[in-house]
């Protein structure tokens, strides 16, 4: 089932999310819903607070090549366990901040530990777009949006645009 995506500004997008203690059927169903919502948007990642659930759960699939097999990843309690000194700049977007994009600098490579949908502990290194996306999604679990990396004036302008968008959508 597809779920509605919260639009910034929303207090739920600023909260620190709670670790997942047990993988219940409800949480696994939420992960499936999030993947469906992400692919439909379309997007390459989604974090639980973006659908209003304040738990440490993210999904991502950064396979972009047409014809290449999809690689959906579901991560409970993801944590960056190591990061490169080298940084890369990527023009990021966010499904909670539609049609706004900005350059963000992050470590080029990260190692991430997480619990998968079968309850198994996993650890893997990511680079390129995967590294950017997993860091963006983990930021969501800590109440941080990509616009928080921008200068205050640019952030304010984007926030005002989103407030206007929300008013227009509420009227429609
Ligand atoms: O967290 C989100 O809001 C999802 C976001 C993830 C992301 C994008 C870019 C850099 C870092 C993280 C998106 O998926 S925005 C949409 C998007 O980037 C995209 C959509 C379709 C095809 C390719 C990319
Ligand atoms: Zn986002």
Image (cartoon, rainbow, N blue to C red):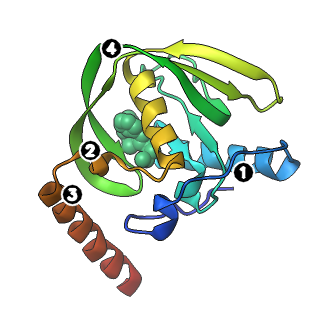
Front tag of 4 and 2: 4
Instruction: Kindly identify the residue that appears in the image at 71 percent across and 44 percent down.
Output: 32
Q: Is residue 43 visible?
A: no
Front tag of 3 and 1: 3
Instruction: Kindly identify the residue that appears in the image at 77 percent across and 33 percent down.
Output: 117
Question: Closest to the observer: 63 or 125?
Answer: 125
Q: Earlier in the sequence, mark 2 or mark 3?
A: 2
Q: Earlier in the sequence, mark 3 or mark 4?
A: 4
Q: Give SS at disc 4.
A: loop
Q: Is residue 161 left or right of residue 11?
A: left
Cα–Cα gap, marks 2 and 3:
9 Å
Cα–Cα gap, marks 3 and 4:
26 Å
Question: Closest to the observer: 171 or 59?
Answer: 59
User: What is the number of the mark on residue 85?
Assistant: 4
Report ligand 1 position as a quadrant: top left
Instruction: Kindly identify the residue that appears in the image at 35 percent across and 75 percent down.
Output: 166
Q: Which residue is mark 3?
A: 155
- Circles 2, 1 touching at the beta carbon (< 8 Å): no
């Amino acid at each position: 089932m597809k779920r509605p995506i919260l639009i910034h500004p929303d207090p739920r997008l600023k909260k620190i999310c709670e670790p997942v203690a047990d993988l219940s059927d409800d949480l696994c169903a939420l992960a499936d819903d999030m993947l469906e919502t992400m692919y439909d948007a379309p997007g390459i990642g989604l974090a639980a607070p973006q659908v209003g659930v304040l738990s440490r759960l993210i999904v991502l699939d950064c396979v972009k090549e047409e014809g290449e097999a999809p690689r959906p990843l579901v991560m409970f309690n993801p944590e960056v366990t190591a990061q490169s000194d080298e940084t890369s700049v990527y023009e990021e977007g966010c499904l909670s901040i539609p049609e706004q994009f900005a350059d963000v600098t992050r470590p080029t490579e990260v190692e991430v530990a997480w619990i998968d949908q079968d309850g198994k502990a996993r650890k893997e290194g990511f680079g390129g777009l995967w590294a950017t996306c997993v860091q963006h999604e983990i930021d969501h679990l800590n109440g941080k949006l990509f616009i928080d990396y921008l200068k205050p004036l640019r952030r304010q302008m984007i926030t005002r645009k989103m407030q206007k968008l929300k008013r227009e959508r509420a009227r429609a």
